[in-house]
Each structure stands twice: as structure tokens, then as C-alpha cells.
């Protein structure tokens, strides 16, 4: 980490946590979610 003025720089995640933000959502798709998304995406293209 770089230091400026004797204090370490915080990563963006650490900066958000300093303001009380906490990651609460999963950032992933299950197989079922992906299948449903694919069907919804392809439906308007179907003849």
C-alpha cells in the first residue's frame, strides 16, 4: 500500500465500510436464474 503523510491509503471497499456501508447482496447467478434469464432474453426473438 502507498502511504501519504504517514497514513495508509484505503481500498474503495474499506472507504465504503468507513461510512457504514456493508455488502449485503450476492453478486452471482444460480443455474436456475441463468436459465430463466436466457428464456426471457430469447422469447422476443422466437418466431
Image (cartoon, rainbow, N blue to C red):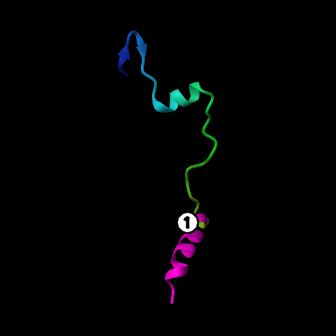
- Graded by Cα atoms within 10 Å as few (under 14), some (14 to 19) or many (20 or more), the crowding at tag 1 reads few
To which quarter of the image does residue 22 belong? top right
Residue 19, compared with residue 41, is above or below; it is: above
Please identify the residue farthest to the bottom as the structure is shown. 47
Taking depth in this image into account, of 34 and 9 the one nearest to the observer is 9
Residue 24 is situated, as x and y percent measured from the top left of the image, at: 64, 42
Taking depth in this image into account, of 23 and 16 the one nearest to the observer is 16
Q: Secondary structure at mark 1?
A: helix
Taking depth in this image into account, of 37 and 32 the one nearest to the observer is 37
Main secondary structure along the magenta-highlighted residues: helix
Q: Which residues are magenta?
A: 33-47
Residue 34, compared with residue 1, is above or below; it is: below
Residue at (55% x, 80% y) in the render = 43
Image quadrant where one finds the N terminus:
top left
Tell whether 42 sits left or right of 5.
right
Residue 2 is situated, as x and y percent measured from the top left of the image, at: 35, 20
Residue 17, compared with residue 6, is above or below; it is: below
Residue at (55% x, 66% y) in the render = 34
Residue at (56% x, 58% y) in the render = 29
Residue 7 is situated, as x and y percent measured from the top left of the image, at: 43, 13
User: Which residue is label 1 attached to?
Assistant: 34
Residue 23 magenta: no
Amino acid at each position: 500500500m502507498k502511504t501519504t503523510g504517514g497514513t495508509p491509503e484505503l481500498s474503495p471497499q474499506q472507504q465504503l465500510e468507513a461510512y457504514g456501508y456493508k455488502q449485503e447482496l450476492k453478486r452471482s447467478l444460480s443455474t436456475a436464474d441463468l436459465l430463466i434469464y436466457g428464456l426471457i432474453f430469447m422469447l422476443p426473438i422466437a418466431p
